[in-house]
Structure formats: structure tokens, C-alpha cells
Amino acid sequence: MTLTQSVLELKGEMLMLNVLRLYDINIENIESALQLKRDEAPMFFIQSPIVIDCSNLGEQGKLLDLRALRRILVKMDFVPVGLRGIADGMRAAALAAGWNILRTPARPPSKDKKVLAKEKKSSIAKSDIESEKVADNPVEPVTIQKSNMTIERPIRSGQQVYAENADLIVLSQTSAGSEIMADGSIHVYGPLRGRVLAGVKGDTTARIFCRSLEAELIVIAGCYQLLDESDTNLQGKPAMIYLDQDKLIIEPLI
Amino acid sequence: MSRVIVVTSGKGGVGKTTTSAAFSAGLASKGYKTAVIDFDVGLRNLDLIMGVERRVVYDFVNVINGEATLRQALIKDKRVDNLYILPASQTRDKDALTEEGVENVINDLKDDGFDYIICDSPAGIEKGAFMALYFADEAIIVTNPEVSSVRDSDRILGILQSKSRAAEEGNVVKEHLVITRYSPERVDSGDMISLDDIVEILSVPLLGVIPESGSVLQASNSGIPVIMDKESRAGQAYMDIVGRFLGEKIEHRFLDVEKQGFFKKLFG
Ligand SMILES: Nc1ncnc2c1ncn2[C@@H]1O[C@H](COP(=O)(O)OP(=O)(O)O)[C@@H](O)[C@H]1O
Ligand SMILES: [Mg+2]
């Protein structure tokens, strides 16, 4: 065993994170709106990490009272992780107020995609972000009640589908350049060609089933594998993928 | 009942305008009252390919802005009855196409009794392309046998089925695949993706395949939709497409490398 291995282990892990997207800089408004959200599911939000996304504030963000913001978050039992999407002029004030500054993800997080399992129709991600008022859903309260989301049409390149708190069933194909995600398991009955992420919130028992395995990237509960780098001989074949001690196992599906 | 059909692809230069011109002329020649609209504001190609560029007085944007009536702007084709062209503006930008304006024009065409309204989309996935597909009932996806073209078609299909009005209302836009500039030689030599592979990747029903043919450029240079050139393979293939679209059973042709037949060699 090498030294590093005995001292520590560093690995990526999917962590459930709340993102608070601000559309207003008025602290009172933010506090009351957030309080309402929190009161909907108080247990759920206790000590849950939260990132503040300021990208919709623009230059106005400079006027936001960052100390007060931090204070109200802590008071409501959130764990403030950091700020992102801040205007240039906000940096110094942010650091002075004790905030970390995070990189803005290249790709907007899946939450923005407004594809929630509870949408009745099998809906496909719309990439536009509708502007709602303060505190646009800081992650829906999770009552782990699994349902499923069924999509009948192909999922095309550039599209993203997320089955929140649910299994995802795709009756057609998924294209190269698409991304399908589920908190539960994923079943694809046409060729599976895009990126596929099961157990997005960390469910290590989630599995992926497909009729023709041609995916670009396979992820279960944060453990990932590029198909091109895999030594599987099941490319283009029916397969089941599951997690065994942090290792992705690809098995033939009868 | 009017049908709105968008001719789209994502990628540029694949043959959308050529297909729009041929398809609309073909439908009109079969007796359907057909309008073809150029959504490529700023480039304006369709009127050239259809040989009416010298007759353009008013354009699509003028109509949207209320500077001309639809009747004033529509150009009636002199060779094919039932065929009308609504040219794009050369001097405006794509923002001139408003959703409301486009909808009004399409509704006016429907009220005028047009059977088919063909929307020739610009390349890309910006405003112009979006406006061209937004009101579509059906879509002709034009693809070349190249990886980038197939990928772009896949993307545009995604946009079509999630952002069009039909999709917003929970309906599905009917999809048709047209593969253009198909060169069996280059597929055989591995330079190009085969027909089967394209259909398999996109999983859209194949309406037809147009072979790569010099007659296309010739036709567009002389301002005559290639479908009117009965001698040309591309023209015949477009006519087949129109027939299939209207429900006729027509075998696909021009798919294999042309055998340099003995007679052809002898008599060229
Ligand atoms: N089947 C074909 N064979 C040969 N050339 C073609 C064919 N289809 C289109 N072209 C040529 O390709 C170019 C682009 O065609 P066009 O219809 O303007 O594409 P788009 O509208 O998609 O940009 C033109 O020069 C046209 O003559
Ligand atoms: Mg064009």
C-alpha cells in the first residue's frame, strides 16, 4: 500500500446541494421567501449545504448585504458553502464577509433544467431558465417516495432529462450528446448512446439496464466509467450495470 | 386543412433551400396550392434558386412590419401553377422575425386556402431557425452523410420536439428524413456514413435520398428548381420524395454505385 493510500483517500462524490438563486437583493424579501421554503420541509433543510447563485443579480449584486445573508442562512440551519456567479465588483466584499467563492459550472446544474419527475408529461429538458421570484426552489423537499418517469420519444443530442426521486424509463433511443439522469435506476429500450447517470443523489443500489450499450459515459452514485475506456465486451449488447464496492460492474442482460 | 412543413437541418449548406424549392414546386405541380417562405433573413437564397430574384419587391419582413400586405409580397411562380414564394429580406437581421408576426403570416396563408406552407429554415439553432420550426406540423430533416451533419440533425430534432408550439401543446411534430448529396462511391470508400447508419442513428422514417449531382448547381444557377429537370437523377429523386410524401409507394433509388454499364461506356 502506498503512503497516500494509508493516509487518506480523495475521491469525487455526488453531494446533494441546494442552490439558492437570487433575483432580488432585498435582505428582508430574501429572508421571508426563504423562511417560507424552509418551513415547507424543516427537517430536510437542517444542516444542508447551500450555494448562493448570484448570476441573475448582475452588477446589482454589489448592493447585496453578504454578511446579513450569511447570518440568516446560519440562523435557518443551512450550511453556507459559497457564492457563485458573482459580479466582478463583489469579490472583495464576499471574501471579507467570510464567503467562499465557487467556480460557476460550465454547464448549468441539472436543477435549472426544470425537468422534474413530477411533471406529468414525459417532458424533455428546456434549457431556458424561467425566472421566478426570490429563492427559486432551493431543491424540492425530498420525501423519498419513488415513482417513475417514462419517456416515449428519442432523447436527442443536447437534451437533458432528469427523473428526480424516480426511476427513468426511456422507450426509444438516447443520442450521443444527450444526458439522462435519475435518482433511481434507468432503463433504456432503444440504443443507449449518450451520457447516463443513475443514483444521482447517491443511491448506490441504483442500476442501469439497456438493450444496446453504446453510452459515452456511465455513472452510478458518482462512480463513473467512460465506455471507451472500459474493457467490457458488451458494447452494442444488452447490459446491466451496477455498483459493487465503488466499482461499476457491467454484466450481460440475459 | 393546411399543413405547415419546416425544412431544417441545424447545419448549413446541406441542401435545405434546394430541398424547399424542389419540394414546394413538386407539391404545386401535383395540384396543391403551396407557399414557400424563406426564413433566412439576411441571406436570401430561395428566390435565387427559384429564379424570381428580379421580381422581389416586398419581403417577409415587410409583411411582418405591416409595410406591405401578404398579397403584395407573395410572388407567383410563372412556370408552376399554385406555387407562391415569400422571399426573405436581405437588409434586415433575424430579430425582425417576431413570433406574432410569423404567426400572422402563417395564419393568413392558411386563410387564403394554401394546402402546404413550406418554411425554409436558416442554419443554426438561433432565432431564424427557431421561428421556422415553431409553427410546424411536420418537419423535413435534411442531412448529409457526414458525422457533423447527422449530429446537428439530431440536435434540431430535439429542439423541434421540445420547443415547437406543437411540442408545447403536448403534440409531436411528424418527422421525415431526407438525405441529400448522397454519394454511394464515397460511402463505399468509407468517407461517408451509410444510409442505414444514418437512419439507425437518427431513427426517423426515411422519405428519400438525393444523390450528389451536378445538375443541382446547374439548376440553381439557372433559377429552375431541380425537380423540374426530368433528366436529372436529383430531380427524379425529389419527385419520388413528393410522391412518397403524398402517400404513394415508390421504391428508393440511386442508392448504389452506378454500374458503368457496357452501353454507357460505349455510348457515354
Ligand atoms: N444533391 C446535390 N448535389 C450536388 N450539390 C448539391 C445538392 N444539394 C445541394 N447542393 C449544393 O449545396 C449547396 C448548398 O445547398 P443549399 O440548398 O443552399 O443548402 P442550405 O439551404 O442547407 O444552406 C449549393 O451550392 C447547392 O447547389
Ligand atoms: Mg438555405
Image (cartoon, rainbow, N blue to C red):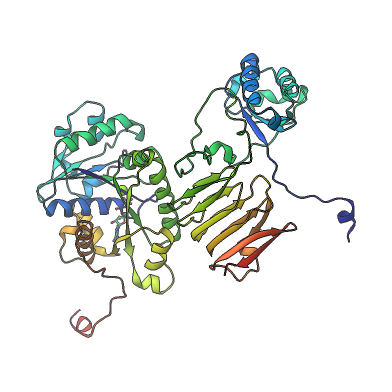
Left or right of B137? Residue A160 is: right
What residue is at 52 percent from the left and 25 percent from the top?
A132
Q: Is residue B184 above or below residue A51?
A: below
Left or right of B118? Residue A242 is: right
Q: In x, y percent, where is residue B204?
A: 36, 58
Q: In x, y percent, where is residue A183?
A: 61, 46
Quarter of image, res A172:
bottom left
Left or right of B22? Residue A57 is: right
Q: Quadrant of ligand 1?
A: bottom left
Q: In x, y percent, where is residue A89?
A: 66, 23
What residue is at 69 percent from the left and 27 percent from the top?
A42
**Visible in this render: residue B224?**
no
**Visible in this render: residue A105?**
yes
The quadrant in which the N terminus of chain B is found is: top left
What residue is at 42 percent from the left and 74 percent from the top?
B189
Q: In x, y percent, where is residue B138?
A: 29, 48
What residue is at 11 percent from the left and 46 percent from the top?
B82
Quarter of image, res B135:
top left
Number of marks: 0
Between B235 and A84, the residue placed more toward the observer is A84
Between A198 and B124, the residue placed more toward the observer is A198
The quadrant in which the C terminus of chain B is found is: bottom left
